[in-house]
Every structure is written in C-alpha cells, then in structure tokens.
Amino acid sequence: MEYIIDKIIFPNNNLLDCIVIPIYETYKLSKIAKNINQISNNYILNILKENNIQGKINQNIILYNIPNILCKKFLIIGCGIKNKLNRDKNKLIIYNTINILKKIFVKEINWYLTDIKVNNLNLYWHIRDTIDVIEHNTYKFNRFKKNKSFFKTKIKFIITNNNDNIYRTAIKHSKAINLGIEKAKDLANLPPNICTPEYLSKKSKKLTKKYKNISVDILNIEDIRKIGMNAYLTVSKGSKNKPFISIIKYQNNSKLQPIVLLGKGITFDSGGLSLKPSTNMGEMKYDMCGAAAVYGTMYAIAELQIPINIIGILAGCENMPGSNAYRPGDIIKTLSGITVEITNTDAEGRLILCDILTYIEKYNPKYVIDIATLTGACVIALGNNISGLMSNDKILSNKIIKASLEADDRVWELPTNDISYFNQLKSNFADLINSSSNIAGAITGACFLSKFTKKYNWAHIDIAGTAWYYINNKTLATGRPINMLSQFLINQI
Ligand code: BES
Ligand code: ZN
Ligand code: MN
C-alpha cells in the first residue's frame, strides 16, 4: 500500500475518490462528519437515522452521493462510544474498514480515522497500528497461483492539526517494519521443498546487493564441521539438504558492541527418528520462522539505517529421519565442550542453537536474542497470541517487554531461575539430556540454551504459538515478532 499525507478544506474543488468518516454512538458525529453534515444540510445525520446506523462498532454504511461535496464514495464507520475506545477495538475498526474497502473499487482513500481518540494511544502509535492492520490484512501469498489477486490502494492520511512530523515519522517506521514483515512472511510461507537451508543462505546473500552496509558470511557443512559445531552437524545428518548458517552483518556505527539476533531456521522438522505424528506435520515448514523473523528485522533496520551494529544469524538446517540420522541414545559433544545425550531427536532446535550461542561469543555482543519455534509446550502455556520470553538479564528482558507493549506484539516472561528445571536436564551418561519430561517444556528448553549463554546478556523468544496463524482452517505466517524486535532496536538509539 502507498501512504501519503494531505490536507483538505471543505467544500472541496477537485473530485475525491473516497472518504472514510468516523461516527460515534449514539448518532454522534466526529469533527469531519460534522463538517460534511453541515455543508450537505444535515444529509449525513438524516441518512444515519433513517437506516438506524447509530455508530456502534460494526455499523458501517457506504454513501455514493452527498450534496455539495465532490467525492464519489463515503464510507461511514461506526466507532462505538466516544472516549471509550481501546487499542484492540481500534484495530477492529481499522480491520472492518479494510474489509469493506476490499469489496468496493477505490483508488485513493482519504483517511480520517487517525483523528479518533483511543485511550492510552498517542497519534504516533495510532498511525503505526493503522498501517500494521492494513498491511497484515491485505497480505497475499500469490507465488504459486495462476490468479494473482491483490488489493492495492493509496491511503491518504488527512492532517487536521499541525502534526505532519508525527505522521511522517510513524509512516517511515511502519513502512520499513512492514516491509520486513512482508519479506519474512514470503519466506516463511514457502514450501519446504523450495525453502531449504541453502535457499535461506541465498536470500541472505542478496541483502548485500540492496544495502551497502550489510555483508554476509555463509558457513557451509565443511565450515560447520571445522569449527566443531557437532550438535549442529548432528541434527543435519538425516537430511539430503545440507545445513547452511547465514551470518548477516549490518554495520552502521563504528563504536558500539553488536546486538546478535539468532533465528532457528529448521526448514522442515519431521521430528527425525522420534518422528512427529502425520497430522499437521506440514506445519513444520514454519519451523524456520525464527530465521525468517531475523531476516525481516534486518530488512527493517537496513531500511531505517538505524545507527547501531546488528548481526543477524539464520540457523538453517533440516531435521529428517534418513539412514544417517542421529538417534535417541547418541551422545554428542557440543562446540562448548558440554556433552549431550540425545533423548529425543525432535528436540533439535536447542541443538543447532546451542552451538551458535557458543560461536557468537567471539563477537563480544551487547545483547543476544534468539528467536525460535522451540516448543509445543509454549503454545500450551501461552496460546497463539503471546510469545514466550526467557532471559538471563533483567535489564534486557525489561527492554524487550517495553518494546513488545509499545508495538502491541506481545510477550510474557517465564522464569528459568529454579534448580528444579535444571535437575530435569540431568543425564546419567553425559552433561545434559536434550529433552526432559513433559512438564514446563518451554522453560526447560530455555534452560538448556542458558547453559551456553553464560558469557553475555541473553534472551530467548519462543514463537511456537505466534509464528503462524489459522485462517479458514488454513495457515499463514504472521511475521512475528518483527514488530517487537524492530521496536527494541529503534529504542536502542
Ligand atoms: N519445532 C518443534 C516445536 C513446535 C511444536 C513448534 C509445535 C510449533 C508447534 C520443536 O522442534 C519440537 O519438536 N519440540 C519438542 C520438544 C520436546 C521433544 C522436548 C516438542 O515441543 O514437543
Ligand atoms: Zn523444531
Ligand atoms: Mn522438533
């Protein structure tokens, strides 16, 4: 979508395509509605009353002619009780508006909905939310379709005060972040026969063509072996598709320590020999959504040219039960020297991540955040709208929580600081087991990782429940938590 800002004075001289006008309960007109109602000699109010459109949320009407106003279509949107609007309801109003606009043909929309007051939401975030909702609800994954349908229109935010700058900044941020989200969705929605670890590395490499201050290093299977990332290598053994680690370096400040973002990029998780049940196994193409989120965040940050240094790592690998696959019972030595007894080959995410968590010590990172579809247990604990957050540093986790509240991309912190969780990870044969009993599974996953993050401030985001969603009994990637991550990085400056 295209977003611009403009001013209009009524009565207007040139013909407009469409105006979106808010109204409140009961028959309460917004400023713009009042203005148009007056010029048209009560036309709006009369029509509303005639049709019992009181202004409740979900009460909307399209008008095609209003006297004395040069405009083809008027979309009157019910916004509920004035001054009683919260963020969720406001998002619903925007969502409803877009659904109507999808059904009628409009080239350009004069948007007055950012005028309405939403409790605890300033104009900047109102605009950010608006663009988020519009972009999310007009996204299409068309690549494999003959009929490539899409919805494209120009959104003109109409400024009524002298707040052009707030609009400009919010649009700039939103456009960059939603570009990142779109790129991540496109990557995550791809089928696992196309989106392989190598494919992830090629997409990463391409970023260097687009942004001058991005460079990319790819570690292939030989590099991974030479470095000694045995846990990583072990997971890849059952698949014909070789592992690739993409290291995307964004450098825009000569002094600062880098922030490392690490994304789980299992391009398909069959479970390996601890095979998953076939029901919904296809959803495990999304087991690379952590990597996709890192990729998308790099896009957003590079678009905004934020003056910090970020290293984004896509940990690409496939978990398959081939004849060379690793087995339950195997013992492996991780890059850190810690040995792990494999008790379940389906707990593969922590195995690829733990070696990279050791590898990145060399960057002397300020913060490390890993993003992973790590555990089904996290979905049981928090459901489909809140990601799990676990960390070894209060300052870092509080910054993440702040960004998540701002961006309305929610996380909830779970504890890791209890000996009982670590006791669950004990092995009779090695230093650790990779999968414990089924209590507190999201936490023990994080506790496993925390054994490899002693040297820096680290947070783990479990996006198993939030990385994709269900719509008409089918799935689509969400691009989460790019909004939160981008905000966290914007907040660094
Ligand atoms: N990728 C899965 C986690 C997952 C499950 C994400 C469902 C999204 C939806 C992960 O690799 C996995 O299989 N985890 C196991 C861990 C267990 C064996 C300790 C799980 O959650 O069952
Ligand atoms: Zn997995
Ligand atoms: Mn698994």
Image (cartoon, rainbow, N blue to C red):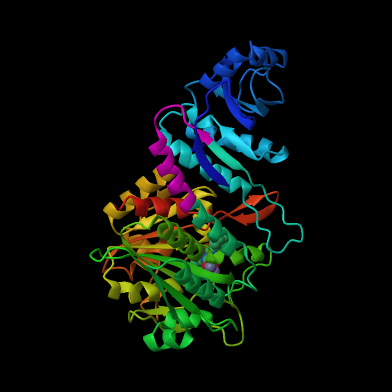
Query: What residue is shown at x 41% (from left), y 47% (from top)?
Result: 404
Question: Residue furthest toward the left?
Answer: 255
Check if residue 398 falls in the magenta segment. no
- Foreground residue among 32 and 128: 32
The percent coordinates of residue 491 (x first, y second) are 32, 50
Q: Is residue 361 above or below residue 475?
A: below
Quadrant of the rendered image holding ligand 3: bottom right
The percent coordinates of residue 352 (x first, y second) are 45, 74
- Foreground residue among 264 and 345: 264
**Within the image, what quadrant is residue 361 found in?**
bottom left
Query: What residue is shown at x 65% (from left), y 57% (from top)?
Result: 141
Q: Is residue 17 above or below residue 431?
A: above
Majority secondary structure in the magenta region: helix
The percent coordinates of residue 234 (x first, y second) are 48, 82
Question: Residue furthest toward the right?
Answer: 146
- Foreground residue among 40 and 454: 40
Query: What residue is shown at x 42% (from left), y 48% (from top)?
Result: 412
The percent coordinates of residue 341 (x first, y second) are 44, 79
Q: Is residue 246 left or right of residue 98?
A: left
Q: Is residue 457 left or right of residue 147?
A: left
- In magenta, the rendered stretch is 157-176
- Foreground residue among 334 and 65: 65
Q: Is residue 368 left or right of residue 318?
A: left
Check if residue 173 falls in the magenta segment. yes
Q: Is residue 347 visible?
A: no
Q: Is residue 92 above or below residue 318?
A: above
**Within the image, what quadrant is residue 15 found in?**
top right
Q: How many marks?
A: 0
Q: Is residue 231 visible?
A: yes
**Within the image, what quadrant is residue 106 found in?**
top right
Q: Is residue 380 left or right of residue 216?
A: right
